[in-house]
Amino acid sequence: MEIAQAQEKVASLKELLNRYAHEYYVLDNPSVPDSEYDQKLEELRRLEEEYPELITSDSPTQRIGGQPLEGFQKVQHTIPMLSLGNAFNEQDLRDFARRASQGTDKALSYVCELKIDGLAISLTYENGQFVRGATRGDGTTGEDITSNLRTIKSIPLSIKEKRKIEVRGECYMPHKSFLALNKQREENGEELFANPRNAAAGSLRQLDPKIAASRNLDVFLYAIGEWEADTVESHSDRLNQLKELGFKTNPEWKKCDSIEEILEYVEYWTKERPNLPYEIDGIVIKVDDLAQQEELGFTVKSPRWAIAYKFPAEEVVTKLKDIELSVGRTGVITPTAILDPVRVAGTTVQRASLHNEDLIRAKDIRIGDTVVIKKAGDIIPEVVRVITEQRTGVEEPYHMPDHCPACGSELVRLEEEVALRCINPNCPAQLQEGLIHFVSRNAMNIDGLGEKVINQLFNEGLIHTIADIYRLERDELLQLERMGEKSVDNLLQAIEVSRENSLERLLFGLGIRFIGAKAAKTLATEFETMDNLQKATYEDLIAIDEIGDKMADSVVQYFAEEKVSDLLNELRDLNLNMKYKGPKRVEVSNDDNPFVGKTVVLTGKMEQMSRPEAKERIEALGGKVTGSVSKKTDLLVAGADAGSKYDKAVELGITIWDEEQFLKMLEG
Ligand SMILES: [Zn+2]
C-alpha cells in the first residue's frame, strides 16, 4: 500500500471507530457487534504499525499513553469550579425555591439531575482535540490527570467543535467495575476500596495510566466552563447541546416547573436509586434559565440558583445473632456478623464483615446486640453502631479465639497488622482457599474447577495440595456426586491444558504474599524461568522497577522454604511448564550494537518473529522503526515477498538485510 492510500484508510478507520465507540460508550446503543469493532481496531493497529508516522493522538489505539508520570501538574481553572449549597430535607428545598423566586420577577423553571457520586472533572478541547483533563481540586486549582482520563472510552479524544471549549462533569466507577475490582484486590491480598467514589478517586490518582485504564471508569458531562461560541440560554438546552457535541450526558434529568414537581422527582429517585448501575448521593436542582441564574448570582460560598439535595444514608436496625469466623488463603481470620435478615438499600442483608478484632472492640459489638446497619457506598453492608440502650444484660462481649477455627493451631498477630492469622501451612481452610485461588481465572484458569468442586474434591480427600490437581484420575472423579462422563472429560482436558500455562499464571497461582497478577507478570518477564526466580536475591528483585521491598522480601522468604522447593519439584515432575512464554524483554545492553541510533524500516513477511516484536526488539536496542523508506533510512529489514519498499531501498543504496541476517544481528 502506498502512503497516501494508507493515510486515507487510517483516516476512514479512525472515523468509523470513533463513531462505533460513541454509539457504544456514549449512547449505549451499538450498531455493530463487538467483533466488528475489534476487527477494525486491529486493522488500524496493523496499519499504524506499518506507518508509525500516521499515528495521531486522537487515534483509538492511543488511549493508553506511554510512561507513568512522576507526579501531577497543577491546573488553574479559568472559571472556578463551584461547589453547591446543600439541602437535607423537604424544608430546605422549599426554602431554596422560595428564595430563588424572590430573587427574580419572571416565573422560574428548574432542571433536576441525579447527583453522581464520583469526582468532578474538567475536559479541555483545542482544535477539536482533547488536550487536558483536570480534577476539581479546591475549585480554582486542580490536578492534571489527562493521561488517566484519556483511557476512559466515553470521553471523546476528538470532537467536531474546533474552538477551544472546556466541558465539565463527573467521573465515576459503575457498580459492576467496583465489585470486580474489590474482588480482585481481595484475591491479591490488597486493601479494599470502601465505596465506588474512593475507588474512582484512587484510580484517577494513579501515575500509571495503565492502571486507570484497567479500572473501567465512566463519565457524565453536565456543564461547559469556557467557550467563546456559547449561545445557549438555558441549562436544559445545555444538556442537549453537550449530547450533540458528542459527550455522554446522564439521561435521567427532568425539567420541573414547581417545587411540587421537584419533590416528586426527589421522592422517585430516593426509591429508585438502588436500581441504578452507578452510585448517586443526591439530586442537583438548578434554575433552568441562564439569564435568571445570572440575576440570582452568588452568596459568598455558592450560587443562589442551584442546590444539592443529599440523600440520607439509609440505616436500618436489626439484631446481631452471632459472629462467624472465616480463614482466608493467607491465614487471615475475618469475623463476620450474622444478622437477622433485613432490607437495606434494595437488597436483603444477613451478613456484614466486621474486618478485625480492633473494630469489634472499638464499636463494642456484642452477640445479641441491636445494631444499626447501612451499606457503605450503598453496596457493602456495615455495622454502624450498637444501640446500647436496648441491651438487656444477656449480650456477651466477643473475644476472638486463640486458636484457628479450622485447624486448631494457635493464632498470631504479625507485626503492624490488625488481623489475626493462622500460620499453620497445613491448615485445611487455607489450603482450600489456596486451591480456589490457584485455579481461578487470572491464575491457572482451569475451567470446571470452581469453588464448589474444589471443596468437594478436598472433602473427599482427592486433593490436598495443588500438585494433587495434576494427579486426578478419571475413575475417581466419576465416582463423585454430580460428575458425569462429559464434565469429567472436560475437567481433565482443562487441567491438561493448564500444564502449558506461561510462568506468570503459575507464579500468581502459588499465592505468594503481595504478588498479584501484575507483579507475577513482571517477575516472569524479568526472570523467564522458575529456576532463575528461585535463585534470585533480594538485590536482584529490588532492582526491578515495579518490585518494591515488601514484594522482594516476600518472594525471597517464599522460595527459601523447603516445602516450597519440594512443591515446585513435584510440579516439575508432573510436567508443568516453568517458563515464561510471552514476548521477551530486551535490555538496552550497550552502545555497540548495530541498531543504536539507526532508522530501520521493516517490510515483507517474517517467518520467526512478528513485526511488532521485531519493532520492540529494535527499539529496545536503541533503534527507531519508521514506516517508509527515505534518504534518512539506515537499514531495511526485508522478509519474504517484499515489495515497493525493497525497490526504493535498492534505488537509494540503503543497507538491506534478510530475516536470517536480522535475527543474527539481534542475537549478537
Ligand atoms: Zn488454621
Image (tube, helix red, strand yellow):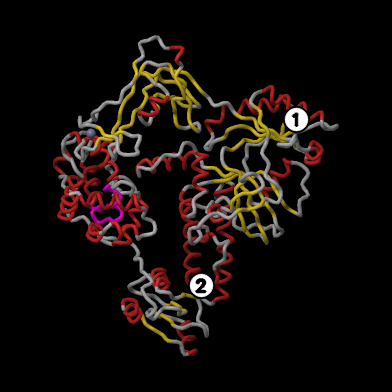
Report x, y in % for residue 317. 47, 18
Q: Identity of the amino acid at label 2?
A: Tyr
The image quadrant in which ligand 1 is located: top left
The kind of secondary structure element at disc 2 is: loop
Where's the C terminus, which quadrant?
bottom left
Q: CA distance from mark 1 to mark 2?
A: 57 Å
Report x, y in % for residue 509. 28, 48
Residue 48 inside the magenta-drawn segment: no
Neighbour class for label 1 at 10 Å: few (<14), some, many (≥20)? some
In the image, which residues are magenta?
496-510
List the residue tagged with mark 1.
257
The kind of secondary structure element at disc 1 is: loop
Q: Does the rendering let one see residue 142?
A: yes
List the residue tagged with mark 2.
51
Between 472 and 533, the residue placed more toward the observer is 533
Residue 509 inside the magenta-drawn segment: yes
